Image: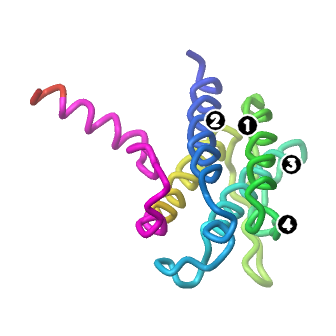
Amino acid sequence: MQIENILSKLNWEVLEELSEFISQLQEGDYANLSPVLKTSSIGQHVRHILELYDCLQNQYSSGIICYDKRKRDQALETEVNAALNKIEAIQAKLDFPDKELSLKVDAGLASQLIQSSYYRELFYNLEHCIHHQAQIKIACNQLDYVQLPASFGVAKSTLDYVKQQSASFG
């Protein structure tokens, strides 16, 4: 399997888990501040995940990716259907060819360009999504109607390691 297919597949799968998860949520549990997270909602975490993917895809052709300059679309954090539609749109465009990119870090008055590539940024988005899924999983502890797969919010390397350990001792 070629690397772009592996990265595209892994990103597609983690986004699909996210989609299946938020499809279960009641609008209030999605949009309102989480009693567990206190300062954010599940929807805000989902918006943040999706907007980084959106930056990568929309800025790909320019060759300069700046995650700091993102739209912050309120509908993605308050409307489950808007988030589901955005996930589907992102999944449809994951398989860009690899190319050199510059990552623009915009820190107030100063900015810096860092050399990167599409594959590197796609991998970053995968890990970033899993990291936020782990936080979302914590927020779901009080939502007894939500069913999450064991893989939700767990790095693929960790899942592989656990599987390998189980096979060794099983």
The answer to whether the residues at label 2 and label 1 have Cβ atoms under 8 Å apart is: yes
Viewer-side label of 4, 1:
1
Q: Residue furthest left?
A: 169
Residue 64 placed where, x, y %? 82, 53
Query: Residue 48 magenta-drawn?
Result: no
Instruction: Tell me which amino acid carries mark 3.
Output: Asn
* SS assignment at label 3: helix
Residue 145: % across, % down: 48, 57
The residue that mark 1 highlights is 91
Q: Nearer the viewer, mark 3 or mark 2?
A: 2
What secondary structure is found at the residue carrying circle 1? helix
* Most foreground residue, 127 or 148: 148
Where is mark 4, residue-wise? 71
The magenta segment is: 138-166
Answer above or below: position of 145 versus 158: below
The answer to whether the residues at label 4 and label 3 have Cβ atoms under 8 Å apart is: no
Q: CA distance from mark 4 to mark 3?
A: 11 Å
- Disc 3 designates what residue? 58
Measure how far apart labels 4 and 1 are at the Cα level.
19 Å
Q: Earlier in the sequence, mark 3 or mark 1?
A: 3
Q: Earlier in the sequence, mark 2 or mark 4?
A: 2
* Separation of marks 3 and 2 at Cα, in angstroms: 17 Å
x and y, in percent, of residue 63 in the image: 84, 46
Q: Of circles 3 and 1, which is in front?
A: 1
Q: Is residue 99 above or below residue 128?
A: above
Q: Residues within 10 Å of mark 3 (few under 14, many from 20)?
A: few
Q: Amino acid at mark 2?
A: Trp
Mark 4 vs mark 3, foreground winner is 4
Q: Which residue is mark 2?
A: 12
Q: Residue 5 location in percent, x, y?
A: 63, 23
